[in-house]
Amino acid sequence: MDTKENAESAPRPRGRPRGFDMETALDKGQRLFHASSYEAVGLAALTDALGVKPPSFYKAFGSKSEFFAQVIERYAQSALALDKILLPGRAPADALAELLESAARTYARDPEQRGCLVLEAARGNDGDESVIHARRVANQRRDRIREFVARTHPEHASAITDFMASTMSGLSASAREGMDETRLVDVARTAVAGLKAQLNSEQRIMGGNDRAKR
């Protein structure tokens, strides 16, 4: 028998199927988790959407929990890319304003994926693996915001970070409840107005103190 025929007729080894695309799998997984929740998406629904058998899924990702961890890491890097918004040297008020408005628009953009996947998953029960993964990513993003603000407003970095986190959490929850993009953006802009007033007030105080020392 021809060698090529032997190769083609031999059974395919268990594991990742031929033509399996990791990015496509993560994207499909994100849509499932976002539309429902980690707990609501069973392994059968997951493997069916990805077009793989459970053994292939486990070989590719290890477990449903590990797959979810990869999904939210990818989501966090693409949905609201902090590195493209919190640029060194940029005025904090402008950067944080863009972040809040971008969040409002992103959370309402897709009716099947409303809210923030990370923030909504982080609301679960302590100890759940999905919650642990989500809170880790959420805390990393909070730290990134805090570091950015601390460069120019070190004394208020923690308070401003908490304000941003609380506002974004509220925007996400409101989006999940059905608030449309226009209203979410209005909420974001109202929050931005208060934030800018706080930052600008502090800048004036700091400027006055500097002049008094001269």
Image (cartoon, grey):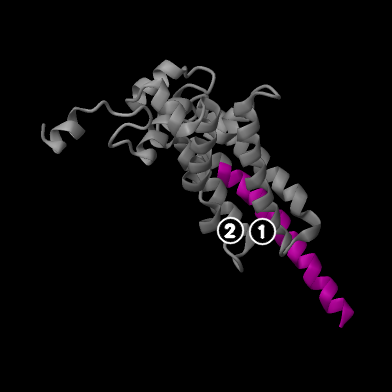
Q: Earlier in the sequence, mark 1 or mark 2?
A: 2
Question: Residue 69: in sight, yes or no?
Answer: yes
User: How many neighbours does mark 1 have within 10 angstroms: few (below 14), some (14-19), or many (20 or more)?
Assistant: many
Span colored in magenta:
188-214
Please state if 142 lies on the left or on the right of 179 as rendered: right
The residue singled out by tag 2 in the image is: 86
- Depth check, front residue: 173 or 131: 131
The residue singled out by tag 1 in the image is: 148
Question: Which residue shows up at 62% across the image and 27% down it?
Answer: 129
Q: If the image is split into quadrants, where does the N terminus sit?
A: top left
Query: Residue most toward the bottom?
Result: 214
| CB under 8 Å between discs 1 and 2 | yes
Q: Position of residue 130 (x, y in %)?
A: 59, 27
Please state if 31 lies on the left or on the right of 37 as rendered: left
Question: Which residue shows up at 62% across the image and 64% down it?
Answer: 91
| Cα separation between marks 1 and 2 | 7 Å
Helix or strand or loop: what does disc 1 sit on?
A: helix
Q: Position of residue 211 (x, y in %)?
A: 83, 78
Instruction: Tell me if residue 206 is in the magenta stretch.
Output: yes
Question: Which residue shows up at 88% across the image and 79% down it?
Answer: 213
Please state if 200 lies on the left or on the right of 181 as rendered: right
Query: Residue most toward the left?
Result: 1
